[in-house]
Amino acid sequence: MSSSIRFSTPASALHDRVAQAWKEVLNIPYCEPSQSWQDGGGDSLATLHLLHKLEHSCGRALPFDVITPEMRLADLVALLETGISAKPAALPTVHLLPGIYGDGPGLAAFRRALAGHMSFDVVEIADLRAPGRVLGDMRLTGEVAACAIDRQQPSGPILLAGFSFGGGVAYEAARALIDNGRDVAFLGILDTTFGIAATGAKRTRRQSLGWKLRSMLRRALSGERTRSALLKASERLSWSAAHRVRSSLQDLFRTGALHRWTPAPLEVEVFLAASEEFAPRTLPIWRRLCARLDVVELPGLHSRILNSPAVDQLIAAFAQRVREVSKSRPLAACVVGHSASG
């Protein structure tokens, strides 16, 4: 198997870039060789900051769980030089679409808990550099994800899952893959809700006004040049402020896509994890859409499903379903991409 994330930058230049990003994020004058990321003060927000800097300087996105608390600078440089190895051949790979703001510590912990059972390919959702028509359309966003998955795994049955907003993207990616003749053996939807178009809910007067204002803003930012100029201008702000700008733009376009989304029925095996908060309004719709639906209801709020006790139940159920699929069908290995197995 080929390595997944590997930089062609010369080793010395790569070391300098990573060291510079490391120092800037931790706000230290030099890098102590024995100091770990955690010992230097690296937390989840700092990890996001470091990943953003590495993506900006090296041109490649990295999954959240690349950076571990015990990692030293030399470890990270070595990892980027040699490449993040693809999954062991014996393990099935699940292509995972993250939530509305991308990968994060909760989803990374979920993947680590399942590392002995499967490997994950974290599929980046169409980012803010994509055309406005893609950002505002769940089906087109799913098609972009399907293309990435098809490149990652060009043959064999596909295991696919999505968390929250990513569940909707995964649903549309599954449709696109099936339409192109691919075999989707497993589709996991992890507590995905629906917007106004699918539920038929009526907006209050205040909600209608907010929707109109957000629609106007989306139209104003639908041009790639305008959006690019705004993102470039945000780079002059502090990292936390720039991060808030990017998150606000992701929320603007992606919630708009979710509210306009009217999914059609899909003939595929679906594993659905639904929180106590979302289940009453989402289960009836999922049951209409998916004739072959396996439901696990989780206690508590949507925002807590990646925390105990809900996540413990989710991990056990998810592992069991993937194991059942793996036993019943021969699964192909991923040959290219950015697998992250925790």
Image (spheres, rainbow, N blue to C red):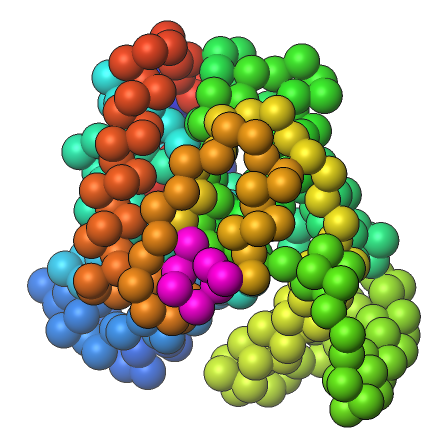
Number of numbered markers: 0
73 horizontally vs 144: left or right: left
Give how far across and how far down residue 30 sits, in percent: 25, 75
Figure quadrant of residue 18: bottom left
Residue pushed farthest left? Answer: 34
Figure quadrant of residue 335: top left
Q: Residue at x 76, y 49 (%)?
A: 262
Give how far across and how far down residue 223 sits, in percent: 88, 64
Q: Is residue 32 visible?
A: no
Q: Nearer the viewer, residue 142 or 149?
A: 142
Q: Nearer the viewer, residue 300 or 61?
A: 300
* Quadrant assignment for the C terminus: top left
Q: Residue at x 64, y 77 (%)?
A: 248
Q: Is residue 103 magenta?
A: no
Figure quadrant of residue 135: bottom right
Residue pushed farthest bottom? Answer: 206
Q: Residue at x 51, y 29 (%)?
A: 292
Give how far across and how far down residue 285 sits, in percent: 61, 49
Q: Residue at x 19, y 75 (%)?
A: 40
144 horizontally vs 70: left or right: right
Magenta residues, as a range? 274-280
Q: Is residue 249 above or below residue 83?
A: below
Q: Is residue 305 visible?
A: yes
Q: Nearer the viewer, residue 156 or 14?
A: 156
216 horizontally vs 58: left or right: right
* Quadrant assignment for the N terminus: top left
Q: Is residue 311 above or below residue 182?
A: below
Give how far across and how far down residue 158 sits, in percent: 49, 22
Q: Is residue 47 above or below residue 194?
A: below
